[in-house]
Image (cartoon, rainbow, N blue to C red):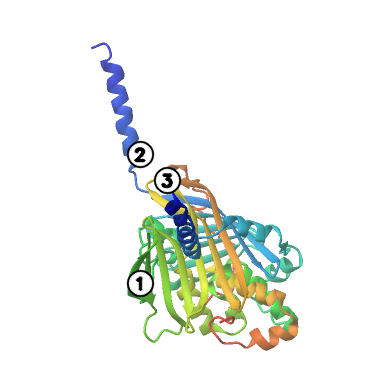
Amino acid sequence: MKKFYLLIPFFLIFFSSYASENSTYKINEAEIDLLFEQSDEIDMSGVFAQKIFIDNYTGRFANGDDDKKIIAGVLALTFLGAFGVHRYYLGHTKAGVIGYLLPSICFGAGWIPAIIDGVLYLTSTDEEFNKKYRDNQKIWVWL
Amino acid sequence: MKFFPAVFFSLMLLLIASFNWFIPIHKISVEMVARSVHKGKSVTAKAEVFYQTTGGLMVTHFTSPFEQVVITNSKGEYKNYDVQNNTLMQSQGLDYSSKNSFFYCFLSGKTQDMGLAAYGYSLRDTRVENEMVITTWNPPAGSSVNLSKVEIVHENLLPVFMGFYNTEGRPAQKIFYSNYQNVQDIRMPMNITEFQYIADNDSIVSRRSYSNIQINESVVNTYLNFKVPANARLVKSAE
């Protein structure tokens, strides 16, 4: 019986390591739910919508850096972002094609890099945007 | 003998039902909610997605934050119709092909490599850990993608994880496939969660949740038959 008790720590260590190893490849849905519940939703209606969807892509975009940041950010957050349209808008055609169309869409989550860009653009200050993103020709600006 | 009609009809019903069980999926529609969070701020997009295996027609009807209809097919013909302003943007290229989509991957049984092989990735090694099969892939030579390897983890033959690692060996992106459900004879994840690492201890978390899956004759064809209005104004095409 004593031997049995001695085995308990062994089993505990074994199963905890098993669980932690599995957790590397498994998602904790409750944690993710909580993360979203505790976040502040960015309102995408109203002003942004007016800016983007009036006279689409007809030249009204070139209204200065402030607009560029907002327009590129919102473009990234629409479906167009998955095709790199926000990068074309900023003049990063090569990055738009290689970084968004080729590697991302094929994995079934083409909009993900675009969403990241959109969030980064919209949460950055004008100075940060101009410095980090506006002329950044890297395929994925966050790498 | 008096039970013969009952037995006969029961067998017929069973036979008909069995035909239905094995009818392959040729159309599917889902509702999708996509959320992304970074530094306590989140964005949400909602859409209905329709996919038809014939011709690979895929129509995504975004209902939020803006109403748009995006149409692609296996040839890479791409149209983006802005409902509110009646404008159309269109382009063509294999990069737009619906063959690159999540639906094609799962409905065509391409989950073993998740489409990596088609993009030139090569298998480096395979190992088994805790009843999960882990395959490691090398990016194509000369690739401009700054990755050292990609890991795909399968559990019970289903992909549960994809990890993209940068040249320093640190994770650049992790994708988790979870909440699998049976769709006809195919298992599909209802949740896809992504972690995009943008700096040390900083990541963007995104999740797509699918619900209300309809297949074959249950799919409402409204958007699969969607025609862009003839008077839609053509705006600058995506290059």
Horizontal and vertical percent position of residue A3: 42, 54
Q: CA distance from mark 3 to mark 1?
A: 28 Å
Mark linked to residue B118: 1
Helix or strand or loop: what does disc 3 sit on? helix
Compute the Cα span from label 3 to label 2. 11 Å
Give A117 or A15, whichever is nearer the viewer.
Answer: A15
Is residue B93 in view?
Answer: no
Q: Is residue A63 left or right of residue B196?
A: right
Question: Which of the two discs, 2 and 1, labels the residue nearer the N terminus?
Answer: 2
Query: Residue B216: which disc?
Result: 3
Q: Residues within 10 Å of mark 2 (few under 14, many from 20)?
A: few
Q: Which mark is residue B20?
A: 2
Can you tell which quarter of the image residue A70 is in?
bottom right
Q: Position of residue A60 (x, y in %)?
A: 70, 78
Query: Could you tell which of marks 3 and 2 lies nearer the N-terminus?
Result: 2
Q: Is residue B109 above or below residue A65?
A: above
